[in-house]
Image: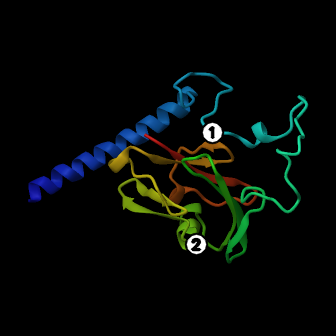
């Protein structure tokens, strides 16, 4: 039994290391989700992409929204208590974005998000392996899906539990399917 446990643990460690290498490779090569290298390509929509463009927009009645109709991204929920506040966004597997203004006295993003129960995971050799974000599961070891952590729209090179909170910075998790 102990031998099987060591083998399983070794496979999990190897999978975690492979995930770290794959994320680092995609960040350094500038590849998008299709594996196409392009300095302008991104693997997730950025705020700049959603801002207005020079092209005319269709303002037909079927696509307009009233002032009362807002999305969670447009109107982030205030959550937590503390002196420091930051914006946190979650993009689920369907591309739906939900946002919160997280207030905390914690020093790291990970500790703050755990405190307000927005993330959950397993502590490991390399820090917190985030499995649940806003109740949505992505477990690389089970189904190949994982959570991409971003800081101001850029893929992070450090884990959420190693990232110090900076006011005015937007932190995000993006569900990345297998």
Query: Could you tell whether 133 is left or right of 85 in the image?
Result: left
Residue in front for this viewpoint, 32 or 86: 32
As helix, strand or loop, the secondary structure at mark 2 comes to: loop
**How far apart are the alpha carbons under marks 1 and 2?**
25 Å
**Residue at point 76%, 37% (across, down):** 49
Q: Give above or below for 124 relative to 61.
A: below
Image quarter for residue 70?
bottom right
As helix, strand or loop, the secondary structure at mark 1 comes to: loop
Lower sequence index among marks 1 and 2? 1
The residue beneath circle 1 is 44
Residue in front for this viewpoint, 6 or 89: 89
Q: State the mark number for residue 32.
A: none
**Residue at point 69%, 26% (across, down):** 40
Give the farthest residue toward the front: 62
Q: Indicate how the structure is coloured in the image.
A: rainbow
Position of the C terminus, as image quadrant, is: top left
**Residue at point 61%, 59% (across, down):** 164
Given contact means CB atoms under 8 Å apart, are the residues at marks 1 and 2 in contact?
no
Percent x, y of residue 68: 85, 63
Image quarter for residue 88?
bottom right
The residue beneath circle 2 is 116
Percent x, y of residue 125: 35, 55
Mark 1 vs mark 2, foreground winner is: 1
Percent x, y of residue 59: 90, 40
Give the farthest residue toward the bottom: 81
Percent x, y of residue 106: 60, 71
**Residue at point 36%, 58% (across, down):** 124
């Amino acid at each position: 039994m102990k031998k099987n446990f060591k083998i399983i643990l070794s496979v999990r460690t190897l999978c975690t290391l492979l995930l770290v290498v794959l994320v680092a490779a995609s960040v350094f090569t500038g590849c998008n989700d299709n594996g196409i290298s392009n300095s302008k390509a991104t693997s997730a929509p950025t705020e700049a992409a959603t801002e207005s463009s020079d092209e005319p927009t269709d303002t037909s009645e079927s696509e307009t929204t009233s002032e009362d109709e807002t999305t969670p991204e447009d109107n982030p929920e205030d959550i937590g208590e503390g002196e420091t506040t930051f914006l946190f966004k979650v993009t689920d597997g369907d591309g739906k974005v939900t946002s919160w203004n997280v207030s905390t006295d914690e020093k790291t993003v990970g500790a703050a998000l755990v405190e307000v129960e927005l993330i959950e995971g397993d502590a490991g050799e390399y820090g917190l392996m985030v499995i649940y974000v806003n109740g949505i599961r992505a477990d690389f070891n089970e189904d190949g899906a994982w959570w991409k952590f971003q800081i101001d729209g850029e893929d992070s090179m450090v884990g959420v539990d190693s990232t110090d909170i900076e006011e005015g910075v937007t932190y995000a998790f993006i569900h990345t399917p297998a």
